[in-house]
Amino acid sequence: MITCYVNTASTPGGDGTTNATTGDNRAYASLNEAEAARQQVLSEPIEIICEGATVDTTAVTIDGWTTSAANYIKIYTTTAARHDGKWDEGKYRLEVNDNLLRLYEAYIKIDGLQTRVTSSAADYSALELSIGADYNEISNCIFRGNGTTNGKVTNNGGIDAKFWNCISYNFNSGFRNHSGNSYFYNCTAYGNNIGFYRLGGTMVAKNNITQSCTTGFSGTFSSDSTNNLSDDATYASSTADIVNTHVLFADEDNDDFHLASNDAGARNYGIDLSADDNLPFSTDIDGQARTSPWDIGADEYVAAEVEFIPRIIIT
C-alpha cells in the first residue's frame, strides 16, 4: 500500500510522504497536487489521506492512472479531519466555484469528504463520474450546493457506481444517473430541484430520503429499488416506498440532517442491506452501527448515552 498525505496547512512542493507541514517530505497542499504528483500505473493500492482545517480550493480531476480491482485509489479523511455527519467548516473540505471533483478512472474509493460548489451561475458538478469511471465507491460524503438552480452529483457513464451514506443538498439534482449503472443506498437529498434523478442508464435506489425538493424522485428506477421516502407523491418504487411523509431532522434550519429523536417517518422503516448482493454495508455516515430495523437515509439514529452517576448518601 502506497500512502501519501494532503494537509491544507502545508505549502506546495513537498513529496507528500508525511503529514508534516514543513520540510521536503511535507504533505501536499491540495488534493489536486497529490493527484498530479502521483499519477502512475499502480502495482499496489494507493491511499491519499486528506487533513487540514482550512479549505482546499483547487478543483480535482482524477485521470491518467492505470488501476485495477486490486490496485485501487482510496481518498479519505482521518477521524480528526472528518465531518460528523453535518457540514463542518473546521474539517477538511473542497470548495470550488465550478466543476469540483471529476473521476475518469476505474476503482476509486472516496470516503468521508465534504465538497461544495460555491457558484450558482451554471450547472456544475460537486462530484462527476465520467466514462471510464467504473466500479467506483463513494461513501459517507457531504455534497453541498449554492442554491437549487445549480449543480449536481452525477454518474455520467460509470459502471457499478456505488453511493452510500451520502448527503446532497441545495443542488439542481441531488443525485443523478445520466448513463451507466449506479446504486444509491441510504442517502439523503434535501432542498434540491430534483432529489434523485434517473435520466438514463440503470439507477437502483434503496433506503433513501428526499425532503424539501421540488420533485423527490424523477424518472424510471430499477425494479430492485425499495424502501425510499419522499415528502411529495413521487417514488422510485411504487409498491415499496413511503410517500407524502415529512422527516424530522435534528436541526433542519442549520443543515443538520441527523434524524431527530421524535422522528416517526424514517426511523425503523429501512431494509437491512448488510447482506445486499451488490452493496453490503452496516454503518451510517457517522460510522455508527446500523441496527435492525434500519433507518432510512444517511443517518442511523442512536440515542445519546446518559452517564450514570451514583448517588451517595452519607448518614
Image (cartoon, rainbow, N blue to C red):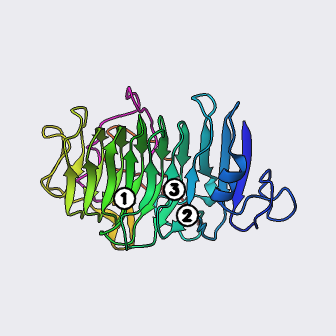
Mark 1 residue element: strand
In the rendered image, the vertical position of residue 164 relative to residue 16, given as above or below: above
The image position of residue 147, as x and y in percent, is 34, 72
Quarter assignment of residue 233: bottom left
Residue with the mark numbered 2: 94
Q: How many numbered circles does the render carry?
A: 3
Residue with the mark numbered 1: 152
What residue do we see at 68% from left, 52% from top?
36
The image position of residue 190, as x and y in percent, is 31, 62
Circle 3/circle 2 CB separation < 8 Å: yes
Q: Which span is picked out in magenta?
A: 261-285
N-term-proximal mark, 1 vs 3: 3
Amino acid type of disc 1?
Answer: Lys
Amino acid type of disc 2?
Answer: Leu
| The C terminus - image quarter | bottom right
> Is residue 42 found left or right of 282 in the rendered image?
right
> Is residue 244 found left or right of 87 in the rendered image?
left
Nearest the eye: 158 or 311 = 158
In the rendered image, the vertical position of residue 131 relative to residue 280, given as above or below: below
In the rendered image, the vertical position of residue 126 relative to residue 290, given as above or below: below
Circle 1/circle 3 CB separation < 8 Å: no
